[in-house]
Amino acid sequence: MINGNLKATYGADERVLNNRNKQMFVFGSIILLSLFPLFADDYSVLMACKMGILLIAVVGVNVLTGYTGLVSLGHGAFVAIGAYSTVIFSNLFSGLPTGILPFIVVPLAIAVSALTGIIVGLPSLRVKGLYLAVATLAASFIVKFLIEQDLFAPWTGGIVGIDTPVPSLLGWELDTKREMYVLITALALGTMLAAQNLFRTRVGRAFIAIRDRDYSAEILGISLLRYKLMSFAISAGYCGLSGALGAYFFARILPEQFGLDLSLELVAALIVGGMGRTLGPLFGVVVVMLVPELIKISMAAATGGSLELARYTGPVQEIVFGLLLVFFLLKEPLGINQITDRILRSANRWPFARG
Amino acid sequence: MTSPATLRNVQARQRALPDLRRTLSLPLNTESFLGKIAKSGTPYLAQRKVRSAMLSISDLYLSFGGIKALQGVSFDAKEGEITGVIGPNGAGKTSLFNAISGFYAPNRGTVTFDGSDITGISPDKRASLGMARTFQNIALFRGMTVLDNIKLGGHTRLNTGLFSSFKYFGSARREELELRRDIEERVIDFLEIDHIRKYPITMLSYGLQKRVELARALAMKPRVLLLDEPVAGMNREETADMARFILDVQEQFGTTILLVEHDMHMVMDICSHIVVLNFGQQIASGTPAEVSQNPAVIEAYLGAAA
Amino acid sequence: MGQFIQFAINGLMSGAIYALIAVGIVSVYKATKVVNFAHGYLIMFGAYFYFTFAVIIPGQDWAPAWLASWKPDWMVEMRRGLGMFSLLGAVLDWAANVPRIICGLIGAVVCNAILGRVVERTLMRPLMGQSVFAMIMVTVGLISILSGSASLIWTADAAFVPHIAPNTPIRFELFGSMIFLFGADIVNMIIALIIFGSIVAMVKFTKGGVAIRATAEDQSTAYSMGISVPKIFSRAWVLASATGAVAGAILATRNGISPSLGLFGFSVLAIVLMGGLDSYVGCFIAAMAVGVLEAMTQWKMGGEWAEIVPYVAVLIVIIFRPHGLMGQKEVERI
């Protein structure tokens, strides 16, 4: 592929943002995101925050499923663990000054999620593919069940849920959506960057090797045990962070928010957006969150706001969600990322024809 | 980027080239070839007369249920030499390799690597000890480019941790660039694959894929290199190229090479010691001259009118 | 002791129903190497179809009266003399429902078979030959489609359906204690076992069954042997949907109609994995075992904890036998 793209140092060759357009895209996006809360209405900020929280979890699932090739249908459980750990630890350490509480509680929540991830990931050492998928499914049902039990209700609030604390970062109380937006966006960007960096180094490469051909990875010195568990830990940790942010963002958390629906939403967002790529999760989250909104708005408009027909919105959203997932699997299994790739490639070539 | 290293390689190969081409078209004429190599002046080989066994297989037994894959195989792969393993299909050659790599645990017998017994050690640990291997049906990672595949060979030599990886800028980046430099200059130039190093694996021809797999093994800086049918399915030209590269690896890096192959010309030419397997049993072991005249070998494998 | 036996028998009866559900999953897997994660929802649709044909349609104004309630004169005569708790009386009461039960079952099986065929055609066929992951994720997408469609068509309200068999309590003595069983449950179990047995026999002994197994092993070879692989796929899905309809009807009579019927699919998925995905014997044993374990858990720890029994069990089994009790390990040639 001769394209006149010559570099003088290896460092320059390894750069990710290697042309003007990419640099402008990234920096432009950051500027837009920073200005967003200044002129957007409350509902949009709410949506943006929800998207940011979901994004972190989907990036985590991307590490496990997109890059390491291990399928999990139960990652909603780790989000739950992150959320509930945040609440439980906040209550446990309520003696400490509120300004430093998040700095202790959130890393602890991430650690607990990561640890649970390692435990849930243990079957991955012995079984492949769909056995693992069902094992993770089973684990997530067990976690949700335990959260709902009256036995643990003093800590988890049981089936009716529990109120969540307001985070305070060294005195700055984030009790409005816009303030949370800043935190969420910063963390979302940071985690996406961290994930991308991971795949520029040996750890990330090892994950991809395990996905593509695990016995070949072994022969190169990659311990399958260590790296599969590491992948589970990382993805569970990311989901835990997402859960922690969710706990701080929403006034109250309930076990039904973390059921099978969430796990399937995560995987669907990943597939729709594009597995195994940095921006895939972003595209997926945007689609998975915006499409139900669009349906809600268009159905309200079509039926003229009738309450009777409004009860159809839920089922229709569900059906469209399923259809979306199936459509992408049949037509574009590499997700929206692949579509944008194609567009950018032909834009790059323009006005020349293919090849 | 024609580095001085590349230039040296090219000159060395050009020297060996006429000999190799001529010999490959002659039937099984080995002594003169080895003599020529010794004469063409690699002091390393000429000086070392008595070599120790780098890889030692002792009394290896391996069976799967009723199938006896290996029955009492014993031989040494001497340091810095090329040892060949030949035999008809189903003789147990790949099972032998899998046992040496650590995928199969033998029922009896030991595998010794540079003096230490590695029989119970897992495959990934054997890699960090310095054992590299290529596979019969190419085992490259199809989701990555050539460069990334080769970089994976360097996995055991790096030690970037998880949190440094997240940060990237700092020690991780330094290590990555160091690895890149080493691979480009030592391996990619050496095997003449710099024009395809950014290509995804799926775009490469079979011959090039085999070469990339060799490159990946070399990136490990191995002390022992196990090559499982490196020239399977290649034409004469590709075979000559690959044989050249294998010889270069032996000369330049002093790697011990263990080779499974069906191409008799190549095996007889480049190997200094050959082991013959048939139905899991070792039926001969010796220099190419000895093996090619061994009646049991001729009957089982080579065919009478050789 | 008596309680133990009571619960054990209840457990076995549940187990039989799980086995019936499991046979659909295993059959589709055997033929297509795809695990249908949405099987529970196919069963739910079968239950809803049964509800439609057994309750909704007979309830319509245009339906003949005998469909809703068949009470010929001789039956009314016989019934008049009998007491409230007599066995014959209960049977006669049930007999009045027979037409709609038959209508319900036939309607459910036919409609579900059509549904299975449509699903296979539109969703599975295009993915033939692609990665198993893609096929599995399509079934996951199918979960949402089926769940949403059911809520849309029938609303999420719970409802009641007529029992397939007379629901009389049967009392008998066993090992010195009183056991209570319901006739309906026994008949359900018998139906489940018969269907399970016939499918296993079919796959093992008939030409069609051999074709199914051949397709599962190696699609391209099966093709070259003259087996129409698409037809096999189709048959497997229709079979799974049809048996699923009966399973759905049975479940509905026990638990009532509601969207939560779909969740049975996941516990049976765990059961199938426990027994080994490609083994009928394995899934039967696992189904019975889980049924009894659930009953025992219900007895000792209360009904709630019985919910997670299959999930805990599958995790434990996977640790010791990664491919299920009777599953076959897939060998990869290096």
Image (cartoon, coloured by chain):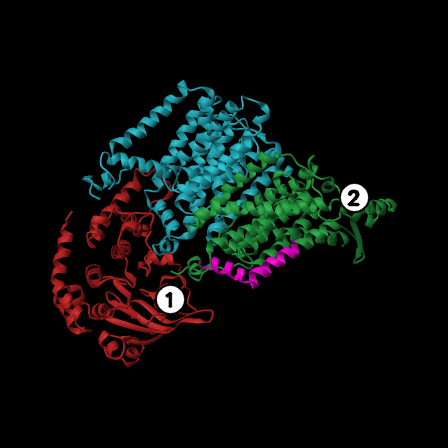
Point out the stretch of residues depicted in magenta. Answer: C192-218
Q: Secondary structure at mark 2?
A: loop
Type of amino acid under label 2: Lys
Q: Residue at x 43, y 58 (%)?
A: C223
Image quarter for residue A189? top left
**Percent position of residue B266, x then y:** 22, 67
What residue sits right under mark 2 in the picture?
C71
Q: Residue furthest bottom?
A: B295
Label number found at residue B244: none
Query: What chain is the cyan one?
Result: A
- Which of the image's four quarters has the N terminus of chain C? bottom right
Q: Foreground: A165 or A1?
A: A1
In the image, which lettered chain appears green? C
Using a 10 Å C-alpha cutoff, classify the residue at mark 2 as few (fewer than 14 neighbours), some (14 to 19) or many (20 or more): some
C290 horizontally vs B253: left or right: right
Question: Where residue C239 appears, x then y in whole percent?
Answer: 57, 52
Chain at tag 2: C
Which chain is displayed in red in the rendered image?
Answer: B
Q: Which residue is mark 1?
A: B95
Please name the residue shown 36% across and 69% down the image.
Answer: B92
Residue under mark 1: which chain is it in?
Answer: B
